[in-house]
Image: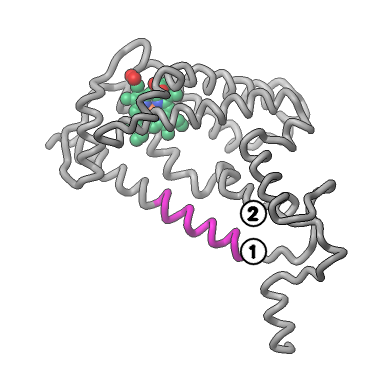
Amino acid sequence: MSFLTVTYALLFYVATAVLIGGLIYRIRLYARTPAPLKIPTMPAPTTQTGVVLRMAREVVFFESLFKSNKWIWIFGWMFHFALVLVLMRHLRYFTEPVWTWVALIQPFGKYAGFAMVAGLAGLWARRIVVERIRYISQPSDHLMLALLLAIGLSGLTMKYVAHTDIVSLKAFILGLMYFDWQPLPPDPVLVIHLSLVIVLMLVFPISKLLHAPGVFFSPTRNQVDDSRDHRHLAPWAAKLESTGK
Ligand code: HEM
């Protein structure tokens, strides 16, 4: 087994553990954070079903972003939608036999790589060109965009410029999953793509990318407008009240 294979196999295990462990830790923290006040952004749904629908519109269409800024919405939605397609397309490297629906979306996923890169380029241009946004942009805002852009560009390079050995790569990935290690093809572009993905997995649980799970815990979006029907008590406050302390 080559040094490259062993190194990347171990790196993938560590990165996966950090990503999953980190996300569980963060999500538990979000779930336990008290929301003492009723603060849904108005107009807000008056039923739980309404909240589910509102959240679905937010997650699928980025509704509130659409209402506030059309340019960021276009680039942001294009990037996220394309990312979902690209990731679904990548499932073929992790499954044998490949599921039918994954095979069916392959042609769309292929072009989604370009949409993903275009969306990221637009979002980055905004941080550089719009003075107000440039002023409030942190180095990490730029770094996250650079990282995602570099992953997209290295992926597109493999797809359209310097093809990689997909069959061996798939054997490597399946080997990691079944603890039966297979050699990683020593292709420079592939190694760059995978290294950047490992960095992404490691930083995800300490980055702004946590907005992905975080949006579900936003009190301004997930609360029902029923403050005139029910007294709102955060669970921790209810516990204090019932024990009389
Ligand atoms: C372990 C994880 C990953 C592996 C093994 C992997 C592998 C690959 C390979 C082999 C290609 C070339 C496809 C071809 O020639 O047909 C590719 C393309 C691409 N990858 Fe990845 N990748 C991974 C994760 C990611 C992630 C997390 C992203 C995005 C954040 C990403 C974005 C892309 C893009 C945009 C393309 C070009 C479009 C496409 O072929 O779908 N990859 N990837």
Q: Is residue 48 left or right of residue 116?
A: right
Residue 100 falls in image quadrant? top left
Secondary structure, mark 1, is: loop
Between residues 137 and 207, which one lies in front from this camera angle? 207
Magenta-span inclusion, residue 101: no
Tag 1: residue type?
A: Thr
Mark identifier at residue 184: none
Q: Residue at x 25, y 33 (%)?
A: 97
Tell me the mark number nearer the camera, choosing from 2 and 1: 2
Question: Residue placed farthest to the right in the image?
Answer: 228
* Bounds of the magenta segment: 18-32
Mark identifier at residue 33: 1
Q: In this view, does 211 lie to the left or right of 72?
A: left
Q: Residue at x 75, y 66 (%)?
A: 36
Indicate whether 232 appears above or below 221: below
Q: Which residue is drawn at 46% across and 19% down?
A: 108
> Would residue 9 be visible to someone looking at this image?
yes
Q: Position of residue 228 (x, y in %)?
A: 87, 64
Residue for badge 2: 217
